[in-house]
Image (tube, rainbow, N blue to C red):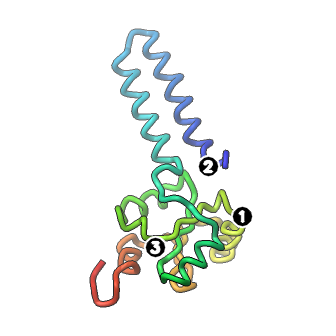
């Protein structure tokens, strides 16, 4: 759990320290702008911007019932963030599994990616797809005969 928050905490701490230094020197505006920028980086690299994660076992169970893809991801991953934002609201329809919270999920990702924890790994109908195009993932969510 702490591993997922390490990078955001470092961004906030660094931003606070640098902003405080600027403000002490009289550059209040620059300090505030820098602090806001670091806070934004912290949020973007935190689990907060992703739908609630579930376990790999729960994701497989839900996917078997509803046919929706499973996305294995981790906080701080730029490609996961890209997928999340390109899917917009549709991202909530996927089953998201944080590999840093679930060792079973991390093992599944390593098995699909020659021992590497390469994310996002999207599993559709039991077949893993590493870092797929967001447009392709949207198509997997569309009902048959209707574009995503």
Q: Could you tell me how many numbered marks the image carries?
A: 3
Q: Quadrant of residue 8?
A: top right
> How dense is the environment of label 1, judged by Cα within 10 Å: few (below 14), some, or many (20 and up)?
few
Residue under pointer 3: 132
Instruction: Of the two numbered discs 1 and 3 on the same chain, state the one appearing first in sequence.
Output: 1
User: Which mark identifies residue 61?
Assistant: none
Image coordinates of residue 57 in percent, x first then y, are 65, 73
> SS of the residue at dot 1?
helix
Q: Quadrant of the C terminus?
A: bottom left
Instruction: Of the two numbered discs 1 and 2 on the same chain, state the one appearing first in sequence.
Output: 2
In the image, taking residue 88 as reference, residue 106 lies left or right, namely right
User: Which mark identifies residue 103?
Assistant: 1
Mark 1 → mark 3, Cα distance in angstroms: 22 Å
- Identity of the residue drawn at 43% across and 70% down: 93
Mark 1 → mark 2, Cα distance in angstroms: 13 Å
Mark nearest the camera among 3 and 2 is 2
Contact between labelled residues 3 and 1, with CB atoms less than 8 Å apart: no
In this view, the residue in front, 34 or 100, is 100
Residue under pointer 2: 4
- Identity of the residue drawn at 46% across and 34% down: 38
Mark 3 → mark 2, Cα distance in angstroms: 23 Å
> SS of the residue at dot 3?
loop
Image coordinates of residue 21 in percent, x first then y, are 49, 16
In this view, the residue in front, 45 or 141, is 141
**Is 11 placed above or below 5 here?**
above
> SS of the residue at dot 2?
helix
């Amino acid at each position: 759990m702490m591993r997922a928050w390490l990078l955001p905490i470092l961004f906030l701490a660094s931003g606070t320290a640098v902003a405080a230094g600027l403000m002490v020197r009289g550059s209040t505006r620059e300090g505030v702008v820098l602090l806001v920028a670091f806070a934004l980086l912290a949020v973007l690299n935190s689990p907060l911007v992703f739908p609630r994660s579930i376990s790999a076992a729960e994701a497989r169970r839900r996917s078997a019932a509803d046919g929706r893809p499973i996305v294995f991801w981790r906080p701080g991953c730029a490609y996961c963030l890209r997928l999340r934002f390109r899917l917009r609201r549709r991202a909530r329809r996927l089953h998201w599994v944080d590999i840093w919270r679930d060792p079973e999920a991390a093992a599944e990702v390593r098995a699909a990616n020659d021992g590497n924890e390469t994310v996002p790994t999207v599993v559709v109908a039991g077949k893993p797809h590493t870092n797929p195009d967001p447009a392709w993932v949207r198509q997997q969510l569309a009902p048959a005969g209707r574009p995503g």
